[in-house]
């Protein structure tokens, strides 16, 4: 997706060979025009999949998920990382390790919001080691819901997450797939989606 790649080149900051900072438009401050285009792109790619829910994990996946769900006309469900007094039982749960933050979280979703007849598109901001997506897939398996695919805003294609998810036979569509962050420069793979 050219608009996204241009934004990454213009505003992204390479902090190391493994870390790209995109907080000016994706995961701290949000560019709504870009998020709308991202949501429409995911909706276009999955227009014939019969999506009934969009699933993400708090917090950075919520903005692109909202715009995709708006285009589909379906709800967004997001996994919570923290316990809540109002979300205490009747839950699907899984463990997710965050490479960036160096912590493992229990994520949870109320059983009220995922059903066995749901066709779900997972959307997240980054795919690196794949732990967030694996946790969400685990929850969908617990709910006996069908996974239509995984939409990723930015994939770090040089890390293992994409391969792990694709090897499970799951469709992954990445709007920007990064080949390398070496020498402080972002280099993209040409093809950024697969089935």
Image (cartoon, rainbow, N blue to C red):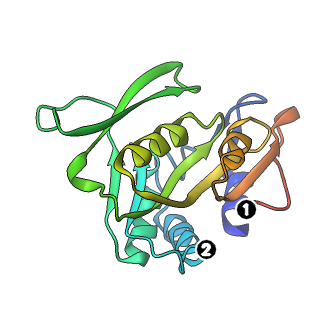
Q: Position of residue 193 (x, y in %)?
A: 73, 62
Q: Position of residue 81 (x, y in %)?
A: 34, 33
Give the residue number, with chain letter if any, for mark 1.
193
Q: Position of residue 67 (x, y in %)?
A: 43, 68
Q: Residue at x 30, y 58 (%)?
A: 115
Helix, strand or loop at label 2? It is helix
Q: Residue at x 18, y 32 (%)?
A: 84
Q: Which mark is residue 16?
A: none
Label 2 Cα crowd, 10 Å radius (few <14 / some 14-19 / many 20+): few
Q: Is residue 176 visible?
A: yes
Image marks 2 and 1: residues in contact by CB distance under 8 Å: yes
Residue furthest to the left in view is 86
Q: Quadrant of residue 38?
A: bottom right
Q: Is residue 186 visible?
A: no
Q: Position of residue 169 (x, y in %)?
A: 67, 53
Q: Indicate whether 154 appears above or below 21.
A: below
Left or right: residue 90 versus residue 73 is left
Q: Indicate whether 70 appears above or below 151.
A: below
Give the residue number, with chain letter if any, for mark 2.
45
Q: Nearer the viewer, residue 78 or 94?
A: 94
Helix, strand or loop at label 1? It is strand
Q: Quadrant of residue 126?
A: top right
């Amino acid at each position: 997706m050219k608009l996204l790649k241009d934004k990454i080149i213009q505003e992204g900051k390479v902090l190391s060979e493994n870390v790209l900072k995109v907080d000016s438009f994706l995961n701290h401050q949000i560019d709504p025009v870009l998020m709308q285009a991202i949501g429409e792109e995911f909706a276009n790619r999955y227009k014939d999949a019969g999506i009934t829910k969009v699933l993400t994990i708090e917090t950075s996946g919520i903005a692109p998920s909202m715009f995709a769900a708006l285009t589909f006309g379906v709800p967004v469900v997001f996994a919570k990382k923290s316990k809540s007094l109002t979300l205490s039982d009747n839950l699907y749960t899984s463990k997710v390790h965050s490479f960036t933050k160096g912590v493992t979280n229990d994520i949870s979703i109320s059983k009220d919001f995922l059903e066995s007849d749901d066709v779900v598109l997972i959307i997240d901001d980054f795919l690196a080691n794949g732990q967030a997506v694996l946790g969400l897939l685990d929850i969908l398996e617990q709910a006996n819901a069908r996974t239509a695919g995984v939409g990723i805003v930015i994939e770090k294609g040089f890390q293992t997450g994409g391969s792990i998810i694709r090897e499970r036979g799951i469709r992954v569509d990445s709007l920007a797939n990064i080949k390398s962050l070496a020498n402080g420069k972002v280099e993209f793979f040409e093809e950024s989606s697969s089935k």
